[in-house]
Amino acid sequence: MRTTLIIVLLSFSLAASNLVLAAKVTRVPGKTASKFDIDTRWYKKYAAVKGIPIVASRKVSDRALLKSVGIMNQVLFGNRFKIAPHLIKYRAKMAIVARGQHFSNMPEISSKSYDHAAGLACCGYLRWNQKSNSWKRYYQTGFTRETNALQLPYPRDKWGPGNSVLIHEFAHVIHESVFENVYSKISKLITRAYNTAKKKGLWKGAYAMTNKYEYFAEGSERWFNVKTREGEDYFTTGGPYPHNRKELKKHDIRLYKLLKRIYGNRKWRFRYGKLCTKAYELCDNKYKLSAPFGPSLARAASQNAFMVGEDFDLKVATTGSSFSFDDYSYVEVPNSSKWTLGFKEEQDDLPQMGGNFAFGYQLGGIQYRVAADNTFLGSKGSGWLGYKDARSAYVSVGKRYSLGNKWNISGDVTYGWSQANAEREGVFQDFSKVHALGFNASAGYQLNTNNAFGISLNSPLKVEKGSLIIKSPYDAERVNLSPSGRQVDVGVSFQHQIDAQRSVSAGITYINDYHHDRDVTRGQVMLNYRGSF
């Protein structure tokens, strides 16, 4: 197996004008199944790249399909031969084999002779085309394995760790379905380049010399920096062979020029798995979400082909960062009975929502409070997932009532506002203004001198409105930052005053849509003792 890996930073232009909506994993559409001869009894999952199907059984994870979409989009993005329409015309597709399954389990394949292969391109057939008076290949299918599509480490992926089997098999499909069907000149150039390389011994002993098809597929991998070093005979068969675009240019200039003509000379390079060292800025990409966003952006990232394809979705995480004016300790401003100043300690490494200070003002029995910070509503990003010039503000209005019949009632409403500007080359673009809302309401009843009963209804600050765009070289998707749920805490408590210094309290809280995640519920039982000696 190849062992050396190269990481190249992702680079892309955000100037594309004709943007395609981000791909999603769905059931196989009926018309697509009929057109591409897809067996829907087996294939239950579907995604598409420029209309080219990627199909899988129910056992395959959505992430495997989305990563495949991301890679195929990058491969096709710079091509000059309108490859995608031709693949659609000749009914080509890609398929993913689930973990624990073999190629012989797939409906297109009956032979077990390929079960130990890393990937496969097959199963098309020739049909006579009267218009061109020639044979054309239809229904060619490229197969890869789920473990490799997910870029899992060895031994979880024992079929091709470090390599993209998808790019290899997709290159086969392009070669046979497009170049041999449509661009015979390109097909002949591939054959000539192969024969020349073989004659010169450029790839002696390498898999690329198996035939012209493997020569093109292996070259395509190297064009996108996929190939790690050759195997155990690395130093004994005329190696080292090139394993990236730069080395390919020095080693086989004819193949290099041909691949440049086909794929274009974009800067994107394939990266296998979670490879991070301090030497690579890409590993510093992070986006930490505060609690008011709930799972909205993290969930959208996990369903976005570009984010998943580049593993950016793994960099978006929800933190415990939240905001409440009750988190501050207040003191009266000297020489003023109406103004108060609030102080708050740092929250470890979490973004400091509201900053370290808050101001309060009492007027007509109503308490007003304000605070501000330089975060995007408590969320912070860096690297490709960063932003600039963020600012947030928080305002609270509250009032406390004493009804005079042993009842005390209080309530407040907090409004949050935030705005950020996008980095020029960032993934997140077009930040809208974000509006958030939270509220607290409570009532207490004094049963007697020593016992009190309380009820509460609270909802932590939640994004009500706001969005941003996840933008990539090949698609764009506007994401709603408002979570689908709203956390509401309903509590009941009882307090017993033992004496002047000691008290004990017990409470039960029901939490609906925990962290603003719809249908996630939690319950809490609390028992507190307070005393001084």
Image (cartoon, grey):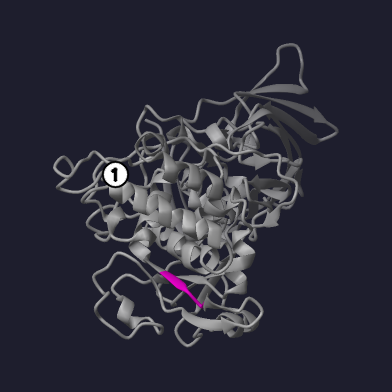
Classified by dominant secondary structure, the portion drawn in magenta counts as strand
Work out whether residue 499 or residue 416 is closer to the camera in this orientation and state it: 416
Residue 519 as seen in the image, left or right of residue 219 = right
User: From the viewer's perspective, is residue 339 above or below residue 530?
Assistant: above
Residue lying farthest to the right in this orientation:
364
Q: Position of residue 513 (x, y in %)?
A: 58, 61
Which residue is rendered at x = 49% and y = 47% of the image? 258
Work out whether residue 462 or residue 427 is closer to the camera in this orientation and state it: 427
Residue 73 as seen in the image, left or right of residue 376 = left
Which residue is rendered at x = 63% and y = 33% of the image? 425
Which residue is rendered at x = 63% and y = 83% of the image? 130
Q: Position of residue 411 (x, y in %)?
A: 72, 47
Q: What is the number of callouts on the image? A: 1
Snapshot quadrant of residue 122: bottom left
Q: Is residue 374 magenta?
A: no
Work out whether residue 125 or residue 85 is closer to the camera in this orientation and state it: 125
Residue assigned mark 1 = 200
Residue 79 appearing in the image: yes
Please state which amino acid type lies under the numbered disc 1.
Lys
Check the picture and name the quadrant holding the C terminus: top left
Residue 450 appearing in the image: no
Snapshot quadrant of residue 48: bottom right
Q: Position of residue 293 (x, y in %)?
A: 62, 48
Which residues make up the magenta segment? 138-142
Q: Under tag 1, what secondary structure?
A: helix
Snapshot quadrant of residue 447: bottom right
* Label 1 Cα neighbours within 10 Å, binned few <14 / some 14-19 / many ≥20: few
Residue 304 as seen in the image, left or right of residue 413 = left
User: From the viewer's perspective, is residue 121 above or below residue 311?
Assistant: below
Q: Position of residue 102 (x, y in %)?
A: 30, 76
Residue lying farthest to the top in this orientation:
335
Work out whether residue 299 or residue 424 is closer to the camera in this orientation and state it: 424
